Amino acid sequence: MLLDDWINESTKRVLLVEPNFPIPNKSRNHSNFLPIGLLKIAGYLRTKDIEVKLIRYEHTDTMQTTLDVNFQKGEIEFIPDLICVTSIFTYWSSYVKDAVLHFKRKFKDTPIIVGGIYASLLPEHCKEYTHCDGVITGIVDCAEKVTPAYDLVDVNYQILHTTRGCIRQCGFCGVYTIEPEWLCKKSIKDEIIKKRLIFYDNNLFANPYIENILEELIELKKNRKISYIESQSGFDGRLLIKKPHLAKMIKEAGFKNPKIAWDHELTDASFIKKQLDILIDAGFKPSEISVFMIYDYELDYNEMEEKRAKCFEWGVQIADCRYRPLDATFDNYNPRKRKQTNKDYWINPNWTDAEVRLFRRNVRRHNICIRYGVDFHSAKLERKQIPQEKAREYRSMSYDEVKYLLDDIWTPKEAHLVEKDNMFPQSN
């Protein structure tokens, strides 16, 4: 069913709900988590003179109280004729269910529909598990051409798409299911209403009109109409090699923190280095660049660790992405625990729980070293457990100079490999 199938002449008020996803409160307005779909729907409903209210659950132990406090509109309670609940990852399905059940209890006669990623990838599961009245799959087309209702949130940026869908069909990605049609815009300049832009394209460079769009952005930057641009997804390195001039264009347009992906084997290192060199030649510093790497997936820990060390050799950061199957409906991974099993979260047969935690830790230390321009990490230094004067001395030294002075020294220069039988770290 479509959104319009749930709207009629008697629809006067619509409640938009972002469930209580486990997002830290400080990150709720981060562009990675903004409920842009709900903001678009809000903009569309307003064109029909329908009043909207957005509830963004705070991540709190007193969920019921928080909901009721946020739900009041002055002294008059907002009684919705329709409730739209968004979803993100399939493994956060329980939070969607909690939201649906809460509002079913509060408004027994109001229909509740669910849309978003989980609803689109697993519509039958969503309908049965959450007990919602309907599921909206894919893009809500009627809301695509309407300016999102940014007044409902506190952000200084806007989210843009120049394309929908993707020309690739990567096994770990559900985009081609959620957005099966490849759609491209020729121009976006008339959509821009803020100075900071975040592109949500799955493959920005694949747009056949990308040069025209970048020229628009370059002109807007020259006229000081925009000041910051970032692409949430990585740039397609295969297309970058075919069109290296795009790197200079994104630099001139003002793109920050470019990312590429290294999805496959260590033997692709020279191919990845070529992509990085194109970005560096365009004016990006290596430390500004990140490489997406998906782990707990097809390649084992040791190969991923060798790839990580290679990235340090190149001076770039890593954006690590832990794999979850597209049909996973739970993920109870807890970074504070020392040992979990595949009953808690997905662990690839090639990996162990200890390896997942070790790689995640290595990437964190790697990125700290890149950002601070050093070749070693010490938890004691990071936690200020060493006298300040001595800490300054250590930080001025190299790994080879300090490795015998600190007992928790770690360097990203080496691949910290493991023996598969006993998980004892080895350095090559």
Image (cartoon, rainbow, N blue to C red):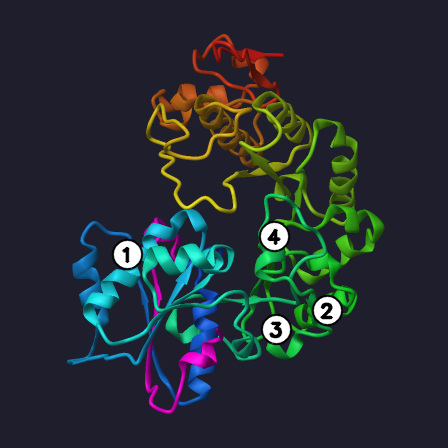
Q: What's the CA distance linking mark 1 and mark 2?
A: 41 Å
> Badge 2 is on which residue?
213
Left or right: 95, with 287 as reference point: left
Instruction: Please tell me whether mark 1 or mark 2 is closer to you in this view.
Output: 1
Q: Residue at x 49, y 10 (%)?
A: 424
Gap between marks 4 and 2 measured at Cα: 17 Å
User: Which residue position is annotated with label 4?
Assistant: 233
Judging depth in this view, the residue of 36 and 191 nearest the camera is: 36
Q: Which residue is mark 1?
A: 98
The disc, 4 or 2, on the residue closer to the chain's N-terminal end is 2
Location of residue 73 by image quarter: bottom left
- Dot 1 or dot 2: first in sequence order is 1
Disc 3 or disc 4, which is closer to the eye? Answer: 4
Residue drawn at point x = 51 percent, y = 10 percent: 421
Q: Measure the C-alpha gap from mark 3 to mark 2.
A: 15 Å
* Residue 102 seen: yes
Of tags 3 and 2, which is closer to the observer?
2
- The amino acid pointed to by label 4 is Ser
Of tags 3 and 1, the one toward the viewer is 1
The answer to whether the residues at label 4 and label 2 have Cβ atoms under 8 Å apart is no
Q: Magenta segment: does it hold 409?
A: no
Give residue 226's position: percent from left, percent from top: 60, 69
**Amino acid on which the number 3 mark rests in the picture:** Lys
Given this view, does label 1 or label 4 mark the residue nearer the observer?
A: 1
Alpha carbon separation for disc pair 3 and 4: 23 Å
State the extent of the magenta-drawn residues as a range: 1-28
Of the numbered discs 1 and 4, the one sitting upstream in the chain is 1
Above-or-below relation of 380 to 148: above
Q: Are marks 3 and 2 in contact (CB under 8 Å)?
A: no
Give the residue number, with chain letter if any, for mark 3.
225
Where residue 22 appears, as percent x and y from the top left, is: 34, 48
**Which of the pair 329/163 is nearer the observer?**
329
